[in-house]
Image (cartoon, grey):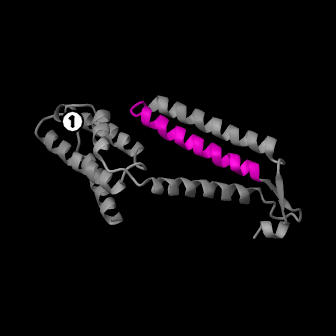
Amino acid sequence: MSDKKEKYRQQILEIQEKLNAENRVYFDKFYETMGVNMLAYKEEIMVETVYTLLLDLLDAQYGGETASAYFGMDAVDMAKKMLEKMQRENPRYMLKVAAFIMVSGLFWSYFSEIKWFSAKPYQFSWVVYLLDIVIYLIFAVLFYRIMQLLIGRKILSYVILWLMLCLMIGTFVLISLFLKDFQAIAVPALTSKV
């Protein structure tokens, strides 16, 4: 199945090069809108749909039509209309992806704070880890929703993305600074490194 997706992606890249400037802008907006929703829908179906639409667009271009004239709507509306009909990804899959990223982050934060050459026990606060999980989930949902609302507005979405990242990092730093010793658990030096 992965070979099929990669084949479609490769063909999409090749066909994209054949589009004129106006149709390329249309397709880029369409593809960006579809890409923002990549996790929520079946990826195989989405890539195949994008490929099929691109073939239609190329045929229209050879016939002398522009993309907006051929499809009768702008790229963002076209993508939203297609997403309404597309099969959604299983929510368990999305939870698995979020859990993997979250566990990886917690694992990294644990191992990055260990004093590898120290004989002192390692202390960590379970409250900090719990709050990190909650903050991560809140920001992940907010980020995904905001990016869906700001499709097609690149500058505004970049500004909001940077503000959200700064706010999230600042929140993590403040939690670590003020709650680092709250409900701390001491792990012996040797077992914390294993």
Q: Residue furthest left?
A: 63
- x and y percentages locating residue 111 in the rendered image: 72, 60
Residue at the location (47% across, 56% down)? 92
Q: Residue furthest right?
A: 120
What amino acid is labelled 1 in the image?
Ala
- Near mark 1 (Cα within 10 A), the count class, few <14, some 14-19 or many ≥20, is many
Q: Is residue 182 above or below residue 21?
A: below
Give the magenta range.
Answer: 126-153
Q: Is residue 40 above or below residue 148?
A: below
Labels in figure, total: 1
Is 109 placed left or right of 119 in the picture? Answer: left
Residue at the location (68% across, 47% down)? 132
According to the picture, the residue beneath numbered tag 1 turns out to be: 67
Residue at the location (45% across, 53% down)? 91
Which is more toward the observer, 145 or 117?
A: 145
Report the quarter where the C terminus lies. Answer: bottom right
Q: Is residue 137 magenta?
A: yes
Q: Is residue 148 magenta?
A: yes
Q: Secondary structure at mark 1?
A: helix
- x and y percentages locating residue 73 in the rendered image: 23, 31
- x and y percentages locating residue 15 in the rendered image: 24, 49
Tell me which corner region of the image, top left, top right, bottom left or bottom right, holds residue 150.
top left
